[in-house]
Image (cartoon, helix red, strand yellow):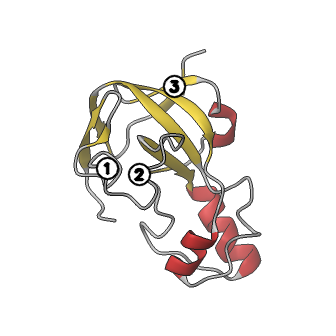
Amino acid sequence: MTAVDRIRAVAGVGLEGDRYAERAGHWSPDPKVDRQLTLVAAEEIDRLAERFDIVLGPGETRRNVTTRGVDVNALVGRRFRIGDVECEGTRLCEPCQYLTDLVGQPILEPLVHRAGLRARILTGGDIAIGDEVVALD
């Protein structure tokens, strides 16, 4: 994972340069897996550190966008916008053993129902640091 100030979101595909947009991600061959865009709440990363003494560095959650002040779970089944990019939340990103193995921390149980959101990109455009996440419905 590499942090960037701005990235191009491509409708129906994903983020330019992202492993899933390029069909090179770990679960890319699975047609049921929808990972055009993933979000995680910074508050959950903070909670891991405060309650479980598990400190994850930038990008270690393996999510594309880190939010603050947004209930990402509440966006499941809803349309929302990040900057001018319109998205639809499809389901929660539940933690898995693969992610646990990658980060080398016991995150599986503490992140159940808290590990982020999967979303489809409905309209393309740029997403930049500081863009607001706004529910549309």
Q: Position of residue 132 (x, y in %)?
A: 44, 34
- SS at circle 3: strand
Sequence-earlier tag: 3 or 2? 2
State the separation of the CA atoms marked 3 and 2: 24 Å
Which residue sits at x=63%, y=72%?
97
Q: Residues within 10 Å of mark 3 (few under 14, many from 20)?
A: many
Q: In the rendered view, tell whether residue 80 sits above or below residue 56.
A: above
Residue 122: name its quadrant.
top left
| Residue topped by disc 2 | 28
Task: Give me the disc on residue 23.
Answer: 1
Quarter that holds the C terminus: top right
Q: In the rendered view, tell whether residue 20 sits above or below residue 14.
A: below
**Closer to us: 119 or 32:** 32
Q: Say left or right for 32 vs 17.
A: right
Q: Is residue 36 visible?
A: yes
Q: Position of residue 74 (x, y in %)?
A: 69, 34
State the separation of the CA atoms marked 2 and 1: 5 Å
Q: Position of residue 117 (x, y in %)?
A: 58, 44
Which residue sits at x=24%, y=45%?
6
Q: Are marks 2 and 1 in contact (CB under 8 Å)?
A: yes
Sequence-earlier tag: 2 or 1? 1
Quarter that holds the N terminus: bottom left
Q: Position of residue 30 (x, y in %)?
A: 48, 48
Nearer the camera: disc 1 or disc 3: 1
Residue 126: name its quadrant.
top left
Which residue sits at x=31%, y=57%?
24
Q: Amino acid at mark 1?
A: Arg
Q: Say left or right for 1 vs 26.
A: left
Q: Amino acid at mark 3?
A: Phe
State the separation of the CA atoms marked 1 and 3: 25 Å
